[in-house]
Amino acid sequence: MKLLGHHLVVPLPGGALLMRKRSAAVGCVLLAFTLIAMFAAHWLGVYPIAADRILPLMFSGESNVDQLILLDVRMPRILVGVFVGGLMGMSGAIFQALMRNPLASPDVLGFNAGAAFGALLTIFLFGSAAYVFWGAVVGGVMTAVLVVALSWQRGLDLFRLIMVGIGIGFTLLACADFLMSQLDIQRASDMAKWLVGSLGQIQREDIAPVAIAFVVLGSLGIVLQYSLDRLAFDEDLATGLGLKVNSLRLLLVAVAVVMTATAVAVAGPIPFVAFVSGPIARQLSKTPSSALILAAGIGILVTLLSDTAARTLVASFQMPTGVFTALIGAPYLIWLLARQAKRNLI
Amino acid sequence: MFVDVAQRVGAADNLSVSDKSRGGWSLALVVLLVVLSVVSLGAGVRSIPLSAISDALWATDLSNPDHIVIMEMRVPRLIGALLIGASLAMAGAIMQIVTRNPLADPGLFGVNAGASMAVVLSIWGAGISAAGLFIWPAMAGAFVVSLAVYALANLGQGGASPLRMALAGAAVSSFLLALVRGVLLVSQQTLETYRFWVVGSLQGVKPEVLLQLWPFFAAGFVACLILGRWLNALSLGEDLAKSLGTKMGIVKGLSLFAVVCLSGGSVALAGPVAFVGLVVPHVARRFSGADSAWLLLFSALLGALFVLAGDILGRVLLEGRELQIGVTVALVGGPFFVYLLRKTRMMSP
């Protein structure tokens, strides 16, 4: 690792990662906060576990109630929260940079609506939530294919992609509303709960898919970040730099869609994380780049804090995570905006 | 800042529409609107022939059940559909020009979120449950929250930049909607009343309601008349507009006033109806070209047409039941919008 002007050069196999010093610092702080939040999330809960016993319990192989709650209940939920938050944060940042529009998060573009509709359709058809994961993945990916196919015209027309996505998203949400109005109240309220987005139903088996998606797609995203930032800046410049604009866009859309579809499939469409992570990461690091690693960090923190609040604040009642993501993320974004507006930064 | 300069130049080339064709199209749309209005009065669970409609309008006889249906239900409903269609579309057009973001819609000012919050609080806290009583809470919520969003976006020097506006609006809206969701999970009773309000419905539009709300729509329409020309300068970008002598503060203030009156009135009248404000201006731009006065006019006409057609379809499609306007508009409007996008080259504002 060495310094190069305002940048930090991190050697990697087959290349090197160039990071601005400020981004690297923000990244370290985020990592520290994430670790603290993860520890706190293991500690806090309705069932009391002493803070100094957490690490011993994890590695000792004892088997008692404490260990059961820690390893079978809290840890899967926390790990899935970390991966889901990271996936949503990165996916949002990719879309926002690619479309050059801070409002263009996957919730707005109809991809989440596709995943949600697929999941609801399986509840509607099979009467249980057993196939929700595959319904959401297939729904999200199929919607994305449809949106891309419909907006393709001698290349990917980004403005049309946004508009087609919005049109299809609204239609799918209306279909979902219609499905819900056709059901008995019990199944309808199951669907309504799923639509808020929650980590409450997470089990150990849920860790693997999101963990794999996080590692594979996350590294793909980081590799692609250089091209993404050039694409986001100027198309002609990107072409001049020898980037294949159309295939890169397709690849980035594909990566971001699979990210959001996997996250939604496991945790439901948790709102706000994808929308908020990119802008906050950029404003903290003061970089024009899409700052995917930092966006993932913000996504993780927002999700983790929200889920811990959802679990612990009201002991008698399990609030879904989705209620708290906006309650925690929005005031922070507003504060950041107000502070930066005063200093005239944006 | 969100718009490619190249795209903007392309837009000016492609979208030079002559005044003659604008006049012709607006006339054609008005005729279509009149025809659909008559259809809307006649169609429904109880189908009423044309002669009875004209009798009911010109020589009302309140002992005739057909006349009662027309005057008490269908006419207010027709007026409601026309008002919210035109209002939401114009409010959307204004938002897209002022924030220079093609994804902006009236909801971005927090109007819908504010109204939803106020309605939920009035059900949960005050125990209001009759649909007609939500007008004033909805209106108050829409006003307070949109002012807060505007104030937040205006902090610091330089006023509300498009980016600040977008982030502030989206942040405040999602914060309030999360609160709403929380309340709904805690109180099932609130959910029971709220879920019928939130899909957006024209069923509750009664003469009394229209009499209470018309000043807001009137004020909004007048503001749009004044804004038409002013917004042209704004769509060139803020710096250029300033150097042309535009008073940015006044234009933005009046825009806020228009958007709040129009979309606040709509959400009070029929609940939150999405899609119209976001999508109709993009279609209207096909007819109007880049001129914002014409854009507002075509948005109003197309919005009214769209909501009216959606309302008729919603009443006719399912026999004996009706599909709420919020659902129909998205169900029918979505595919139609995608078709239009494929058919024609549409431009960002």
Image (cartoon, coloured by chain):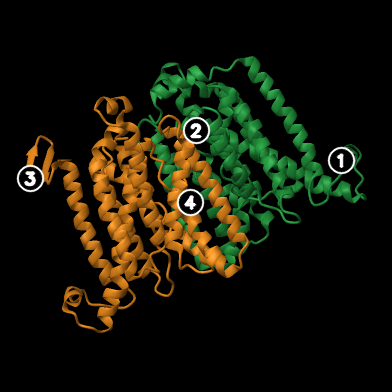
Asked if badge 3 and badge 1 are on a common chain, one would say no
Label 2 packing within 10 angstroms: few (<14), some (14-19), many (20+): many
Gap between marks 4 and 1 measured at Cα: 42 Å
Gap between marks 2 and 3 measured at Cα: 47 Å
Residue B53 tag number: 1
In this view, B253 is above or below A253 = above
- Color used for chain B? green
Asked whether residue A85 appears in the rendered view, the answer is yes
Most extreme residue toward the left is A2
Return the disc, 1 or 2, that comes first in the chain's sequence.
Answer: 1
Asked whether residue B160 appears in the rendered view, the answer is no
Quadrant location of residue A232? Answer: top left
Asked if badge 4 and badge 2 are on a common chain, one would say no
Q: Chain of mark 1?
A: B
Cβ–Cβ under 8 Å for marks 1 and 2: no
Asked if badge 4 and badge 1 are on a common chain, one would say no
In this view, the mark in front (4 or 1): 4
Element marked by disc 3: loop
Gap between marks 4 and 3 measured at Cα: 43 Å
Give the residue type that dot 3 points to. Answer: Met
In the picture of the structure, the residue carrying the numbered disc 3 is: A1
- Color used for chain A? orange
Give the residue type that dot 1 points to. Answer: Ile
Residue B282 appears left or right of A8: right
In this view, B15 is above or below A10 = above
Residue A113 tag number: 4
Q: Chain of mark 3?
A: A
Q: Position of residue A54 (x, y in %)?
A: 20, 74
- A162 or B236, nearer to the observer: A162
